[in-house]
Image (cartoon, grey):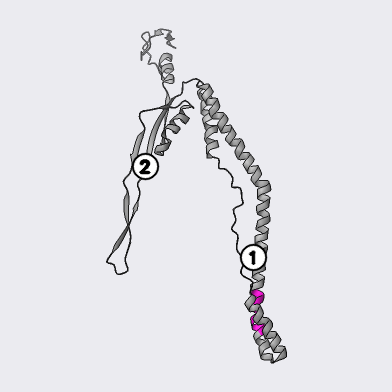
């Protein structure tokens, strides 16, 4: 039983004014506060594919969430939009975008359930594990195929230089004209090969070092997630 802080008169539950001195009582009685604390609940909504409904329910019930009402299946209408017309403007084209199809599940959890704080922590650990992406087993880089070797230009260059020496200088001029683009193409090809070789070295280092570290980190996070849901099941009996 509570008492007035001014006159010491006993106060019954639900009374707003002291019967002894008439003082307005601030707040609710301790009993009402305890009752309100016990009734505090949290709600969450999850949207999933129709084939994932039961799996989702089973998963979240492990963390103390209870199904609130029946899952709601939601379908939106297909949407048709204008996509253009024919060249002579006699025919119009339309495309259809399929509507969404999902199930909305509502969960509720009482904050007064045993081990509530630990369940919240375990749920957070599990969510982090689910959001952690598995690393790719190869570095993300595009291989640039080098240009073909300029065989034809090289033949014309050599032929022109030979004829320029054996026949007339005119052919030598032609040989020099073909020599310049030949050198440029060969240099460009060698540069492309060098870049690919450098990327290949980076790729191997990634596979042998960085990738293994990322994979190790990923596996550790996944293991924590599995341990979290296992521990949560134990807490709920």
* Alpha carbon separation for disc pair 1 and 2: 49 Å
The residue stretch that appears in magenta: 175-184
Quickly name the residue at label 1. 192
Relative to 178, is 67 above or below?
above
Q: Residue 101 carries which label?
A: 2
Q: Residue at x 41, y 37 (%)?
A: 51
Bin the neighbour count of mark 1 within 10 Å (Cα to Cα): few under 14, some 14-19, many 20 and up: some
- Residues 73 and 159: in front is 159
Relative to 68, is 91 above or below?
below
Task: Left or right? Give the position of 181 relative to 99.
Answer: right
Magenta stretch: includes residue 121 = no
- Residues 148 and 77: in front is 148
Sequence order check: which comes first, mark 1 or mark 2? 2
Task: Left or right? Give the position of 28 relative to 131.
Answer: left
Q: Residue at x 66, y 64 (%)?
A: 193
Q: Where is residue 156 in the image (x, y as percent from the top left)?
A: 65, 82
Q: Is residue 175 visible from the viewing direction of this image? A: yes
């Amino acid at each position: 039983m509570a008492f007035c802080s001014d006159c010491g008169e006993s106060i019954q539950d639900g009374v707003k004014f002291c019967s002894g001195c008439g003082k307005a009582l601030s707040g609710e009685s301790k009993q009402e506060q305890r009752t309100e604390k016990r009734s505090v609940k949290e709600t969450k909504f999850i949207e999933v594919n129709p084939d994932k409904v039961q799996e989702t329910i089973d998963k979240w019930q492990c963390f103390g969430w209870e199904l609130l009402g029946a899952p709601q299946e939601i379908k939106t209408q297909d949407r048709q939009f204008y996509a253009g017309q024919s060249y002579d403007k006699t025919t119009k084209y339309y495309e259809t975008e399929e509507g969404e199809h999902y199930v909305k599940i509502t969960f509720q959890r009482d904050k007064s359930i045993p081990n509530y704080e630990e369940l919240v922590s375990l749920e957070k650990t599990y969510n982090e594990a689910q959001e952690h992406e598995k690393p790719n087993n190869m570095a993300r880089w595009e291989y640039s195929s080098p240009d073909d070797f300029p065989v034809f230009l090289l033949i014309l260059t050599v032929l022109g230089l030979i004829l320029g020496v054996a026949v007339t200088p005119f052919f030598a001029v032609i040989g020099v004209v073909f020599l310049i683009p030949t050198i440029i193409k060969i240099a460009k090809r060698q540069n492309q090969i060098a870049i690919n070789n450098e990327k290949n070295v980076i790729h191997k280092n990634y596979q042998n070092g960085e990738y293994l570290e990322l994979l190790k980190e990923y596996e550790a996070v996944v293991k924590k997630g599995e341990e979290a849901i296992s521990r949560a099941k134990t807490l709920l009996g």
